[in-house]
Image: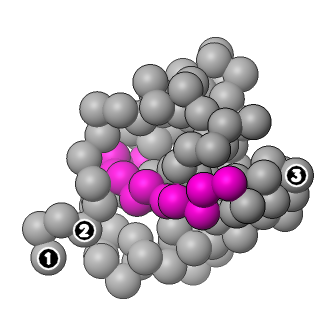
Amino acid sequence: MSADKLTLVVRADLSAAQRAVQACHAMRQFVEEHPLIEQDWFRRSNTLALLEVPDEQALLRLLARSADRATRSSIFREPDIGDRLTAACFEPGPNTRRLCGGLPLALLGL
């Protein structure tokens, strides 16, 4: 496993507060689903990237591309907004860097 960034991707069409909380939910889901990857990342790096996509459709497209690359990820769907997909967390490594490399940092314009 790579000593790289754990990458969180949120929707830019959510409020800043929602983006922050949804990223936390996605990371917590990743810890639950991929504990060994998370433990290795924590010991070696503990570095995060918080990126954003425009909306739910863009996040769905990103997740489809990650599945094509066999990149492990976890998602979060928010019950308070109709179980809509709000955020995802992607494993560290070169596949994630290639997948998310062109995405902008989240919350930059605040």
> In the current view of this chain or complex, which residue is farthest to the front?
44
| Eye-nearest disc, 3 or 1 | 3
Is mark 3 in CB contact (under 8 Å) with mark 1?
Answer: no
Residue 19 forms part of the magenta stretch: no
Q: Residues within 10 Å of mark 1 (few under 14, many from 20)?
A: few
When asked about the image quadrant of residue 59, the answer is top left
Q: Image point 88% across, 52% down: which residue?
A: 36
Front residue (pair 24, 64) = 24
Asked which secondary structure carries label 2, the reply is loop
Q: Which mark is residue 107?
A: 2
Label 3 and label 2: CA atoms lie apart by 29 Å
Q: Is residue 47 above or below residue 71?
A: below
37 to the left or right of 106: right
Q: Which residue is mark 3?
A: 36
Camera-side residue: 54 or 52?
Answer: 52
Say which residue label 1 marks: 110
Disc 3 versus disc 1: distance between alpha carbons? 34 Å
Q: Nearer the viewer, residue 48 or 2?
A: 2
Q: Give percent across and percent down for residue 11.
A: 37, 57
Instruction: Label 1: state its secondary structure.
Output: loop
Badge 2 amino acid: Leu
Disc 3 residue type (three-letter): Leu
Within the image, what quadrant is residue 67 found in?
top right
Q: Which amino acid is tagged 1?
A: Leu
Name the image colouring. Answer: one colour
Q: Residue at x 34, y 52 (%)?
A: 52
